[in-house]
Image (cartoon, rainbow, N blue to C red):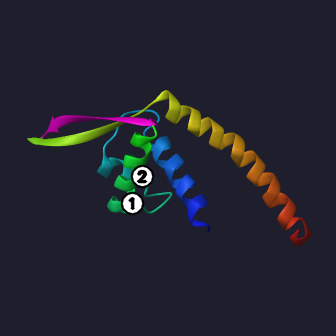
Amino acid sequence: MDVQVKRGLLDVCVLAAIKNEDSYGYKIIKDMKPYIELSESTLYTILKRLETAGMLTVRSAEHDGRLRKYYHITGTGLKRIELFKEEWKEIMSIYQFVIREDQ
């Protein structure tokens, strides 16, 4: 798969993982695991990129004597998920065109 396409898909997956509630790194990986494998280093790169793009915010809170970073999706992040859903419809149409002779 094209690296840029995969990157965009992973960004949206991470946004979707925090869409309904704030979350932290380990929980995001755990929540995504049934669908996609994601390393910690890859996740934190994605989280930093999404924060820089204004799609999420970060806050630190103490948990069991340690600081934990919690990630919160912004309106921009929610819009990115909706845009992805629209784009996916077009991708599926292209896919149907490509496989039409295989059916």
Residue extent of the magenta highlight: 54-63
Q: Residue at x 33, y 59 (%)?
A: 40
Is 18 or 49 nearer to us in this picture? 49
Q: Quadrant of residue 17?
A: top left
Residue 25 lies in magenta, yes or no? no
Residue that extends furthest to the front in the rendered view of this protein: 52
The image's mark for residue 46 is 2
- Left or right: 89, with 72 as reference point: right
Q: Residue at x 79, y 60 (%)?
A: 95
Q: Quadrant of the C terminus?
A: bottom right
The image's mark for residue 56 is none
Residue beneath disc 1: 42
Q: Quadrant of the N terminus?
A: bottom right
Three-letter code for the amino acid on which mark 1 is drawn: Thr
**How far across and how far down the image is residue 77, in percent?**
50, 35
Answer few, some or many: residues within 10 Å of disc 1's Cα (few below 14, many 20 plus, some between 14 and 19). Answer: few
Is 21 or 59 nearer to us in this picture? 59
- Left or right: 103, with 87 as reference point: right
Residue contact at pointers 1 and 2, CB within 8 angstroms: yes
Q: Secondary structure at mark 1?
A: helix
Per the model, the C-alpha gap separating discs 1 and 2 is 6 Å
Q: Residue at x 84, y 66 (%)?
A: 99
Is 41 or 49 nearer to us in this picture? 49
